[in-house]
Amino acid sequence: MLEIRSLNAWYGESHVLHDLDMDVPEGKVVSLLGRNGAGKTTTMRTLMGLMDRTTGRINYGGSDLLKLRPDRIARKGLALCPEDRGIFPSLTVTENLFLPPVIAEGGMPIEHIYELFPNIKERGSSRGTDLSGGEQQMLAIARILRTGARFLLLDEPTEGLAPVIVQQISRTLAEIKERGYTVLLVEQKAHFVDGIADVHYLIENGSIVDRLESAEFHANIDRVDKLLGV
């Protein structure tokens, strides 16, 4: 269980997270939904130790992550898949996949990664940026799984992708969840996370404004759509 309590964060003098409270149970998918600028990406960056000024507590595995450097957080099995995916254009797909070292125990073996992402193996000799947007997203997720991550922070994985690819990513996330991984999923699309996530948090202006269980979220999805403005 990851427990966030009274989390505050600043960019320079700008106070961007305000007493944020969240729980992410082990082996579950939790969504964090909000408009652009609501604080979603800042929350992810704070969990990975990438913000200079923070207060509060982030309890995970008996440690307060706010007291750890980013490399120590990664060694606890947390990994961020950023919105821009971070694929290196000068490297092949296989080189991108194997570039980061394995730094945590209990991650996904490479043979299982290739089962989950067959295109990654088939296109191993292609340049990373020769892949479609959906394939690049799959490569970015596969890469953090190979490092040993058991807790995935996915920042808007469906951004800019065609509906058929969005459905493929949905199926992939369902399989990752079935394998016992924990996912914190940042999104703006309520209908994408409906049926995937076990718990949904809504964020506005750096604060959590609602928490919905899966059934409650489904029943209120029109209200959520209005909040997100999409």
Image (cartoon, helix red, strand yellow):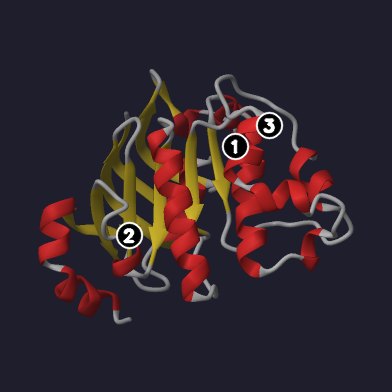
> Dot 1: what SS?
helix
Q: Using the rendered image of the protein, determine whether residue 44 is visible from the camera's viewpoint.
A: no
> Dot 3: what SS?
helix
Task: Please give the label number shown on residue 145.
Answer: 1
Mark 2 residue type: Val
Q: Using the rendered image of the protein, determine whether residue 214 is visible from the camera's viewpoint.
A: yes
Residue 143 in which image quadrant? top right
Residue ID for mark 3: 110
Q: Earlier in the sequence, mark 3 or mark 2?
A: 3
Specify few, some or many for label 3: CA neighbours under 10 Å numbering under 14, 14-19, or 20 or more. some
Q: CA distance from mark 3 to mark 2?
A: 27 Å
Q: CA distance from mark 1 to mark 2?
A: 21 Å
Q: CA distance from mark 3 to mark 1?
A: 9 Å
Task: Please give the label number shown on residue 106.
Answer: none
Residue ID for mark 2: 193
Picture residue at 16% right of the left edge, 60% below the top: 217
> Dot 2: what SS?
helix
Residue 170 in which image quadrant? bottom left
Picture residue at 46% right of the left edge, 74% below the top: 163
Mark 3 residue type: Ile
Picture residue at 48% right of the left edge, 50% below the top: 172
Specify few, some or many for label 2: CA neighbours under 10 Å numbering under 14, 14-19, or 20 or more. many
Residue 192 in which image quadrant? bottom left
Residue 51, percent from left and from top: 53, 48
Q: Earlier in the sequence, mark 3 or mark 1?
A: 3
Q: Quadrant of the N terminus?
A: top left
Going by the image, does 70 lie left or right of 170? right
